[in-house]
Image (tube, rainbow, N blue to C red):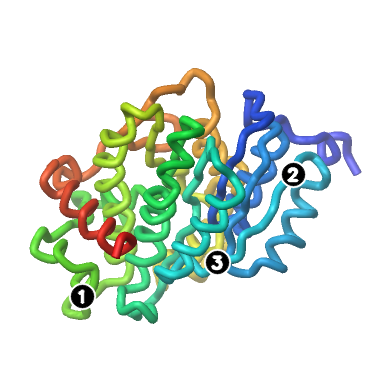
Amino acid sequence: MSARSTRPADPLVDADLAGQVAVVTGASGGMGRVIVAELARAGAHVVAVARDGARTERTLRETVDGHGTFDVVMADLSLRRGVVDAAAAVGRQYAQVHVLVNNAGAHFPDRGLTADGVERHVAVDHLAAFGLTHLLRANLVAGRGRVVHVVSDTVNDTRKVTLAGRPRPATLDPAQLTDLALLNPADGFVAFEAYARAKLLTVTSGYHVARLLRPHGVTVSSVHPGIVATGLVDGLVPAVLRPVGGLLRRTMLTPREGAAAALRLATDPALAGVTGGYHRRGSVATTPAVSYDTAVQRQVYDVSRRWFDR
């Protein structure tokens, strides 16, 4: 075995996080494992939120490998009760939360509803992130925390194949923002667009939440980590390209490379106080015009807040 293959990777976090508490969702996936390990390696105690607690515990023990501490909160973040219970479990044990990385995400090939009656992309790709941020608000304020939503640049272009033509941004219909059950309706449903729309909901409400929390020292940012070779991305590959899926994966970022962007926003001392932005990997970028409409931002925020405050 070569020296290169045995050399430990350079840390992705250039900050001392000793004494801090970091919460990470989607902790058992490729990027999630890296994020947990790097935060723990930098000294933070990491709370990993995952659906399969036992499997996540085993996986993270191998990944963290004694270089830090973590515990696992088991929760199904596709359900309102799962989000509420996860936030309660974290809040009871940790008065301060210094980092919250909402990394959980999913793409489904067809339309389905959760047990709560909400389209699945809306539940997993928006409400999970919104709910944890909202319900842990007091803990984040106490810790002057940083919130990072891991999203997708599909918000700017919902085409699966982008070799030619104009981008087709994700859309939000204000008429559907009065009730979560109206979002991603069956009529005209396209799975890839539904996924992008759910991520756009997170970005759009995130702009509003960033303004609300700025006076309290809490920052909120959204980041597209790049096209990362994960199981989720495998599901986004068009059927016509699946025969060359292996070749496509070689052009994608590794989970470690993708995690770097989220970790930078969550920990870089140079970014202290930076809030309310959308980042495409390491650069500030823009999102569809509708996401900057403050009335729409408030609508998304209000309908999502009511879901958890009832």
| Residue 96: image location, x then y, percent | 54, 38
Q: Of residues 231 and 264, which is closer to you in this image?
A: 264
- Other residues around mark 3 within 10 Å, as few (<14) / some (14–19) / many (≥20): many
Between label 1 and label 2, give the one nearer the viewer: 2
The location of residue 98, given as percent across then percent down, is 53, 35
Amino acid type assigned to the residue bearing label 3 in the image? Ala
Label 2 belongs to which residue?
69
Chain-order first, disc 3 or disc 2: 2
The residue furthest left is 175
Crowdedness near tag 2: few (<14), some (14–19) or many (≥20) residues, C-alpha within 10 Å? some
- The structure residue drawn at horizontal position 40% and vertical position 27%, both measured from the top left corner, is 217
Is residue 13 shown left or right of residue 80? right
Residue, disc 1: 185
Quadrant position of the N terminus in the picture: top right
Is tag 3's residue or tag 1's residue first in the polypeptide sequence? 3
Alpha carbon separation for disc pair 3 and 1: 26 Å
Image coordinates of residue 259 in percent, x first then y, are 56, 42
**Residue type at tag 1:** Pro
Question: Residue at (17%, 48%) from the top-left corner?
Answer: 298
- The reply, left or right, for residue 193 in relation to residue 68 is left
Q: Which of pointers 3 and 1 indicates the residue nearer the eye?
A: 3
Q: Against 273, is 117 above or below?
A: below
> Among all residues in the image, which is located at the extreme top?
270
Q: CA distance from mark 1 to mark 2?
A: 43 Å
Give the secondary structure at mark 2.
strand
Residue under label 3, please give it. Answer: 75
Whether residues under marks 1 and 2 lie with C-beta atoms below 8 angstroms apart, the answer is no
Q: Quadrant of the C terminus?
A: bottom left
